[in-house]
């Protein structure tokens, strides 16, 4: 081969590829190689077993098929029969149609249940339990009293939100008194 002609041996008997000049004028260094070296350009590209098998199948044909063998010159021509669309629906089309119908039914059911759920939630929100409401108001009143105590002691300088909270004390006390009646 051509690349073996370029290989040389040095004084110790090692194989090497001599330096060569690049087009830009610089030199490639000496490259020492082992016996049996094949340059990258000469190595065949990798082909997997599946690739080799598929190339063999193309040459032989489809296993089990005994029809006429296609040649390279044969070309497939469309006929009028090929262009006709089937009149009925295929099996997969029927499946898709059933799925669409089922989905539409589920959507309608979900729509109705969502509407009912919203109405029930609205009824529940308008009529809170008196015990729960009282507990919430007492908790707010306690927080206001704690904040007032801190302000009176001088531990806290109230900001805008805290002042607003303190101003709601009488309102919360009124709501609490209305619940206890």
Image (cartoon, rainbow, N blue to C red):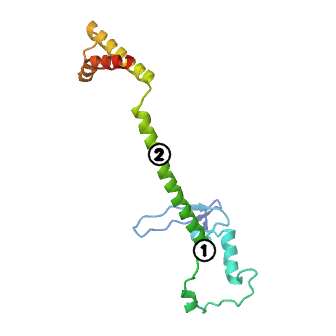
Q: Which residue is mark 1?
A: 5
Residue furthest top as drawn: 153
Residue at 43 percent of width and 42 percent of height: 119
Q: Is residue 77 visible?
A: no
Residue at 64 percent of width and 70 percent of height: 47
Q: Which mark is residue 164?
A: none
Sequence-first disc among 2 and 1: 1
Residue at 40 percent of width and 20 percent of height: 134
Relative to residue 108, is residue 162 depicted above or below? above
Front position among marks 2 and 1: 2
Q: What SS does tag 2 mark? A: helix
Q: Residue 160 appears at what percent x and percent y?
A: 23, 23
Q: Is residue 46 visible?
A: yes
Q: Which mark is residue 116?
A: 2
Residue 108 or residue 46, whichever sits in front: 108
Residue 80 or residue 127, whichever sits in front: 127
Q: Residue 151 appears at what percent x and percent y?
A: 27, 11
Label tally: 2
Residue at 41 percent of width and 31 percent of height: 127
Residue 91 in which image quadrant:
bottom right
Position of residue 125 in the picture relative to residue 55 (left or right): left
Residue 150 in which image quadrant:
top left
Position of residue 61 in the picture relative to residue 45 (left or right): right
């Amino acid at each position: 081969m051509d690349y073996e002609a370029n290989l040389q041996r040095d004084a110790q008997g090692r194989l090497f590829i001599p330096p060569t000049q690049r087009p830009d004028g610089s030199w490639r260094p000496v490259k020492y190689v082992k016996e049996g070296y094949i340059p990258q350009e000469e190595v065949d590209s990798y082909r997997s077993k599946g690739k080799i098998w598929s190339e063999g199948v193309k040459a032989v044909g489809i296993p089990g098929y005994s029809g006429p063998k296609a040649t390279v010159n044969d070309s497939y021509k469309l006929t009028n029969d090929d262009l006709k669309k089937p009149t009925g629906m295929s099996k997969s089309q029927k499946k898709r149609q059933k799925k669409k119908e089922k989905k539409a039914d589920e959507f309608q059911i979900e729509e109705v249940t969502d509407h009912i759920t919203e109405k029930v939630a609205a009824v529940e929100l308008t009529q809170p339990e008196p015990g729960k409401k009282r507990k919430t108001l007492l908790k707010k009143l306690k927080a206001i009293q704690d904040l007032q105590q801190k302000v009176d002691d001088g531990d806290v300088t109230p900001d805008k939100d805290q002042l607003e909270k303190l101003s709601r004390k009488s309102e919360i006390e009124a709501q609490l008194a209305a619940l206890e009646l």
